[in-house]
Image: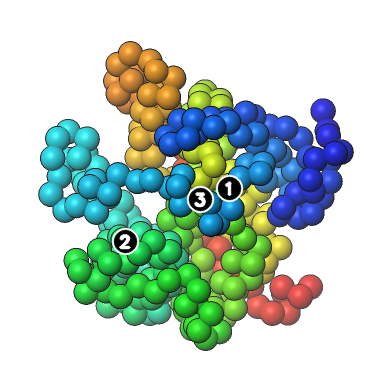
Amino acid sequence: MIYQDFKPCPICGASGQIPYANCTDFTVSKESYTLMRCPSCGVVYTLDPPSEEEMGRYDKVNLKLKLGDSPSGLIGRLYYHVRNRMLRKKVRIVESQAYRTGGSLLNYGAKTGFFSHRMEKRGWKVTSVEKYHEERLFSLEMFHHRMIDVPEMDALHAGTFDVITMWHVFEHCHHPNQLLDRFYELLRPGGILIMACPNICSTDAMYYGPYWAAYDVPRHLWHFSPNSISTLAHRHGFTLMHHEKMPFDSFYISILSEKQLRHRMAFLRGMIKGFQSWKISLTKRSRSSSLVYVFRKRQDTEYND
């Protein structure tokens, strides 16, 4: 059923939004949120989320696990093993898709700076943007890498970067249209934009329904399928060149989803379901729990057409 009295789509402005699901913030507030789907652009979004100023109280993180460099316990050791594997994968994606092993890179939502540091060690000139002071401070103390706050992006010059990356950040951004336009300005002709996002068409999303942990309301404002994110990026001058799965996300998300369902042996059940989801993604990439999208900036004449 289409409801004409809901607000227009915040992405494309179309009316006639469709209720998609009701989800709960199991992590912090226990509040419930409605997800809406736009029949025009296909994006699913969180209805009436907290403002940027309010979001801080919902954004609690396990800083010991996120910032520390000495893993302890099974979960800690697994986290660090997976993180190191994924850092290598991210490097491979950037350098293989950019057809270069050095250049100028903007890492938006750089978190604690591990990826930025890895790219600097490989010879890239890296500019990192991170809104949280604790994480900028960690990067400075750990890697001697100074990050900039989001408002400082205004001082960056157009046509500066060969590559822009966002690793599980775009779904958190309050102003996606403006951000994509800014990225278009900052990239050099033919530059690439790389984004990793959860996939609402994944096997685990369909299995867990509103308990799927990657909905992560209200922190995740947008919930993309391969088609909807490609459509959005195309409207802002980008062409999808490639996408690939993030292999470990199905395990992590399935374990969290099982915990949200309060199932006994949540870790084991999540590992089994994560394996099933991962196995399906081997032959059906679009069913992967998360996907990495590689977009190339179109030329001005193409964009204006």
On screen, residue 266 versus residue 8, left or right, reads: left
Q: Which residue is mark 3?
A: 55
Q: Residue at x 64, y 67 (%)?
A: 178
* Residue at 59%, 53% in the rendered image: 51
Per the model, the C-alpha gap separating discs 2 and 1 is: 22 Å
Q: Quadrant of the C terminus?
A: bottom right
Do the residues under discs 1 and 3 have CB atoms within 8 angstroms?
yes
Helix, strand or loop at mark 2:
helix
Residue 208 visible: yes
Which residue has dot 2 on it?
A: 135
Of discs 2 and 3, which sits in the foreground? 3
Crowding around mark 3 (Cα neighbors within 10 Å: few <14, some 14 to 19, many 20+) is: some
Q: Which mark is first along the chain, 3 or 1?
A: 1
Image point (25%, 63%), residue name: 138
Q: Is residue 266 above or below residue 197?
A: above
Residue type at tag 2? Glu
* Number of other residues with Cα within 10 Å of mark 1, as a class: few under 14, some 14 to 19, many 20 or more: some
Q: Which numbered dot is residue 50?
A: 1
**Label 1 – label 3 distance at C-alpha:** 6 Å
- Tell me if residue 40 can be seen: no
Disc marking residue 94:
none
Q: Distance of mark 2 from mark 3, alpha carbons?
A: 16 Å
Graded by Cα atoms within 10 Å as few (under 14), some (14 to 19) or many (20 or more), the crowding at tag 2 reads: some
Cβ atoms under marks 2 and 1 closer than 8 Å = no
